[in-house]
Amino acid sequence: MGTLDGKVALVTGAGRGIGRGIARLLAREGAAIVVNDLGSSLDGTGADVSVAEQVAREIDPSGERAVFNSHSVADFDGAGAMIGQAIDEFGRIDIVVNVAGILRDRMIFNMTPEEWQAVVDVHLKGTFNTCRWAAIRFREQGGGGRLINFTSSSAFGAAGQPNYAAAKAGIIGLTLSCASALARHGVTANAILPGAATRMIDSIPRTREAALAESGKLPSELAIGTERDPDNVASIVAYLASDAAQGVNGHLFAAYGYNIGLVSQPKIIKTLRADHRWTVEELCDVVPRAFAAELAENQNDPGIGEKMRGIPDEQWVEARPGLRFWGTKLEPYGEQVW
Ligand SMILES: NC(=O)c1ccc[n+]([C@@H]2O[C@H](COP(=O)([O-])OP(=O)(O)OC[C@H]3O[C@@H](n4cnc5c(N)ncnc54)[C@H](O)[C@@H]3O)[C@@H](O)[C@H]2O)c1
């Protein structure tokens, strides 16, 4: 018995990296899988149908529990065909996991409109495309469904990725909108900020060079079986896809190695109210004084993974052997009831 017995899942970008691990785990938990992957290079050029095919064959060589396709998620009709394939092959769709992604990193002052558009098309439009087709079907099926979308801590200000940061921030908004709109149909929508050594990480020059110099291997090769293994991200996705997570809707989870973090939603932290329209002169005077501490403490921060890894040992509370807990609400790190 698996937690996803009888369910049908589409996983985009499932031919490599994080998506491949998700497709395999969802299948092990009992779901039938549509494995989607364009089979493109990291910058989104090229295509190779064998990338999706291989993962589907690994999951089920007979093709009874796993099928594949190589449509681009950026293609609206192609995304519709993915949902159609789930229904034709397995009779329904219950879970959509949007993992497909590319990179075209460039500083804002060097970025071309084409580099901007290609990344926005795959990440933001691609996620809209599958969510849109799935939402229609979820409603027709009479309720229930899971949207699990991949965003990134880069959304909070990665300097060399204006296209990617904007698309990933857009995915957060899209996910939260779906969560609000579809809750009445029993659908949940949540987003994941992952961290794992895949070919995306191999593409970071400093990280790649350091790994090659030390071991002659790429970061993704060194990661297999370690905390940096992309397969580690799949567990939280399978949980969110399960009936056990029916009440978890509209949240952001960070999944870095063996850390699962719950990310806060933006909220007002301090307000100034006047009895008239503010003058610019008043704001020049008051804002630096009133918000000084908050402006300093509340910087944008694309480095969530490093922050999580850097939590000092003494700040963790042991919940049970092998499981530790850290939370801002625990200060000064009192007893945690598990
Ligand atoms: N690896 C990380 O640390 C990290 C960090 C933050 C966010 N992410 C996000 O996680 C997701 C997975 O990343 P990964 O590291 O496994 O990358 P990856 O490059 O290993 O895998 C991405 C897969 O998506 C496929 N793909 C690309 N464009 C597609 C399209 N138009 N249609 C269908 N498939 C397409 C690729 O062929 C590839 O197999 C991405 O959305 C990425 O932005 C990853």
Image (cartoon, helix red, strand yellow):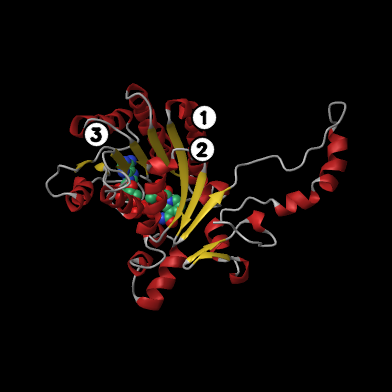
Residue 314 vs residue 5: left or right? right
Quadrant position of the C terminus in the picture: bottom right
Judge left or right: residue 288 versus residue 106. right
- In the image as oriented, which residue stretches furthest toward the top? 140
Count of numbered tags: 3
**Mark 1 crowdedness (10 Å alpha carbons): few <14, some 14-19, many ≥20:** some
**Residue that label 3 marks:** 86
Q: Secondary structure at mark 1?
A: helix
Picture quarter containing residue 5? top left
**N-term mark: 1 or 3:** 3
Inspect this view and state whether residue 113 appears: no
Q: Is mark 1 within 8 Å of ligand 1?
A: no
- The x, y position of residue 23, in whole percent, is 29, 48
* Picture disc at residue 250: 2
How many angstroms separate mark 3 from mark 2 (CA)?
Answer: 25 Å
Q: Which residue is mark 1?
A: 180
Residue at 19% x, 43% y: name it: 65
Q: Which mark is first along the chain, 2 or 3? A: 3
Front one among 292 and 244: 244
Q: In the rendered structure, are the residues bearing label 2 and label 1 in contact, judged by CB atoms less than 8 Å apart?
A: yes
In this view, the residue in front, 117 or 2, is: 2
Real-space Cα separation, disc 2 to disc 1, in angstroms: 7 Å
122 to 51, vertically: above or below: above
Q: Is residue 295 left or right of residue 66?
A: right
* Residue 172: x %, y % from top left: 51, 39
